[in-house]
Amino acid sequence: KQEVTQIPAALSVPEGENLVLNCSFTDSAIYNLQWFRQDPGKGLTSLLLIQSSQREQTSGRLNASLDKSSGRSTLYIAASQPGDSATYLCAVRYRGFNKFYFGSGTKLNVKP
Amino acid sequence: DVKVTQSSRYLVKRTGEKVFLECVQDMDHENMFWYRQDPGLGLRLIYFSYDVKMKEKGDIPEGYSVSREKKERFSLILESASTNQTSMYLCASRYRLAGGQETQYFGPGTRLLVL
């Protein structure tokens, strides 16, 4: 069964800290993996997408890595800011499946 | 910028009413999706469509139907709303670039309350 797990469910850090969010998936036959951000009561905003052939993607202070053999992806946020406070969701598309499987998210709070 | 819009941000309906949720994307994407999001359960796929008039059931299609008469519009229909359909509904569209890269874009969501 395809599952996506995100740990921790919630994280609180002081402003300026570097942090890592984790995403685990159960099947190495993935097509791609996407990280999203969701602000309270809003839709999802795409942050980074990693194809199965890639090891990492970077955008500004964000870096996402992919290790298919261990079934893990990490989202690294450098020099965190209060504006980064949101829920971060990981979504995996497996080969042969048209849909994304979503993790339940990590709720991040960056304290000023 | 890709835009995915949903007809309502908030809706309040009564049990038994027929409810229409509309989603429109402006980028000629072939694939469109309806999810619902509930605390503790995450996002669950209700239905998706890979072309006009084509649809497939997702994980939780019971109590829902969909319509895609035009490429840009994907409608979710609650035939007879029930209180357990109170939820946040999210629409998404997906496209594929040359080389196989693809990404999903989400709408702002519709928060539905069924009384």
Image: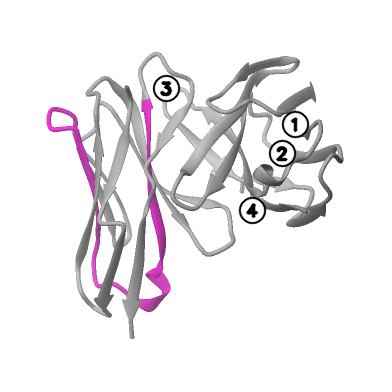
Can you say which quadrant of the picture contains the C terminus of chain A?
bottom left
Q: Are marks 4 and 1 on the same chain?
A: yes
Q: Are marks 3 and 4 in contact (CB under 8 Å)?
A: no
Q: Which mark is residue B26?
A: 2
Q: Are marks 2 and 4 on the same chain?
A: yes
C-alpha separation, residue under disc 4 versus residue under disc 1: 16 Å
Residue A66 visible to an observer of this rendering: no
Q: Which mark is residue B108?
A: 4
Q: Are marks 2 and 1 in contact (CB under 8 Å)?
A: yes
Residue A76 lies in the magenta-colored region: yes
C-alpha separation, residue under disc 2 versus residue under disc 1: 6 Å
Check disc 3 and report the residue beneath it.
Answer: B100
Mark 2 or 4, nearer chain start: 2
Q: Observer-nearest residue: B44 or B115? A: B115
C-alpha separation, residue under disc 1 versus residue under disc 3: 22 Å
Q: Observer-nearest residue: B86 or B110? A: B86
Q: Position of residue A33 (x, y in %)?
A: 34, 35
Q: Observer-nearest residue: B64 or B31? A: B64
How would you rate the neighbour count of disc 2 (Cα within 10 Å): few for under 14, some for 14-19, many for 20 or more?
some
- Chain letter for the residue marked with disc 1 in the picture: B
Check disc 1 and report the residue beneath it.
Answer: B72
How would you rate the neighbour count of disc 4 (Cα within 10 Å): few for under 14, some for 14-19, many for 20 or more?
many
Q: Secondary structure at mark 2?
A: loop
- Chain letter for the residue marked with disc 2 in the picture: B
Tell me which residue sits at (86%, 41%) in the image. Answer: B17
Residue B5 lies in the magenta-colored region: no
Q: Residue furthest bottom?
A: A112
Q: Are marks 3 and 2 in contact (CB under 8 Å)?
A: no
- Tell me where the magenta segment starts and ends, as one range: A65-93
Residue type at mark 2 is Asp
